[in-house]
Amino acid sequence: MRVDRARSLLVVDEADDLLRGDRAGMLMSMFGGKDSESRDKGLLNGVLDTVKTPTVWITNTPAWALDESNRRRFDYSIHFEKLCSAQRLAIWKNSVRRHKLEALFDDAALEEFARRYETSAGGIALALRNIANLAPAREDARALVAKLMEPHCELLDIKPDDSLMPAKDYSLEGLNIKSSISLAQIVEAIRRFQTETASAPPDRPRMNLLLHGAPGTGKTEFVKFLGKTLDTKVVAKMGSDLISKWVGETERNIADAFRQAKAENAILFLDEIDGMLQSREGAQRSWEITQVNEILQQMEKFGGVLVAATNFSDGLDAASLRRFTFKLEFAHLDNAGKKHFYERMFGVPLAREEAARLENIPDLAPGDFRTVRQSFYYLGAGATNHDRLDALERESHAKKHTRYSSQRRIGF
């Protein structure tokens, strides 16, 4: 292809295969050379060194996938980060104006779309273009967005952000926290951290929280409660979301999670952190050390709120424990907590003998009451306190041989 170099700009879109060296012959022919079977990285270097026409390369390939000798030959590089909710909201508003759809959507609706659908600018434009063509009534427009966006997100493996709202009946009251600091105090401490001005001292303490304890004791619900109470987005990452089989990919995923939370001014919630912060003393492989190092470095420089949760705190790296400002143990409910959650979940009082029976059921957590309530949901209104207490006893018995049970037999 011949062009007037003095007045041209060459744009190479979807250049992933070319920049990875997968189609060397194509690359040579594009820039006037002869076809070659060589796949050597020097081919790309030669093109970048000799081409005179200003060229824009567009690729989805991450920079680290290119050889360093290739990367340093680009005069400029621009990395387009994943859109944050504020940026998506601006795109929704611009696209609504462009398609003259202001009569269909108010600001609250657009804010919900921006939060819920973590799609690209192209995905937003496509949905609104289709809505403009369909011309729905105002009362139908919001549901139509869902009908268009949900299949789009499913196709692109984008999970709707609707999983981090606390349960309607969630309450800090009744939880059994083994700490001299109450959860209400923790909430206010985070609020103060968020509102502190730039004049804060340079050695301002971090706001890293470690929540640990048995499953079902309220750790994840507390994070959801934090987000709602503080009106702050929660970026949640499971250990399985970050750990990769590819060398170096886990570390990049960890860095990306912190970067996303910073861009969103969000609380970063790392659930099941034990899979990523295991003690380095017993590490058998180099990546087990490097991923811990990466998290520790990110924790040091992160300026936002980090909450980590684990069911197994005893195996965490010692250096990581020092980096948590607050460490909160969520324990099984005490007698007052059992009574609170029973009445809150089932909405019925207990007779004296029933209350005594409940007190004698060990190792109950808020999650057990929810499980029992759900088990009776479709059975109608015939369940009695006797039935519910039976079910709670079965939940307790199921934990008999777990590491968290007070019923475990010690020794042989």
Image (spheres, helix red, strand yellow):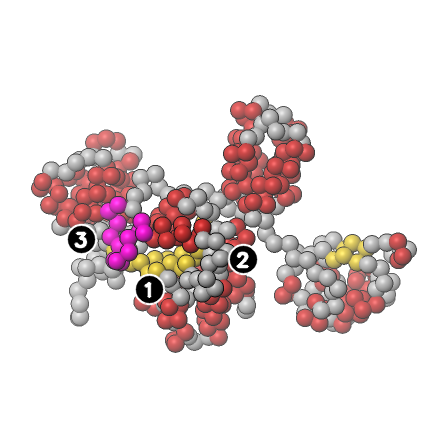
* Pointer 3 local density, CA inside 10 Å: few below 14, some 14–19, many at least 20: many
Q: Position of residue 412 (x, y in %)?
A: 17, 70
Give the left or right position of residue 177, taking residue 243 as reference: left
Q: Position of residue 53 (x, y in %)?
A: 84, 59
Q: Are marks 1 and 3 in contact (CB under 8 Å)?
A: no
Residue 313's label in the rendered image is: 1
Which residue appears at 45% of the width and 50% of the height? 195
177 in magenta? yes
Q: Secondary structure at mark 3?
A: loop
The residue that disc 3 covers is: 362
**In-front residue for pair 23/243:** 243
Q: Are marks 2 and 1 in contact (CB under 8 Å)?
A: no
Q: Position of residue 136 (x, y in %)?
A: 59, 25
The residue that disc 2 covers is: 259
Please state which of the two labelled residues, at mark 1 or mark 3, is closer to the viewer. 1
Sequence order check: which comes first, mark 1 or mark 3?
Answer: 1
Q: Position of residue 184 (x, y in %)?
A: 31, 49
Classify 411 as above or below 351: below
Residues shaded magenta = 173-185
Which residue appears at 40% of the width and 66% of the height? 323
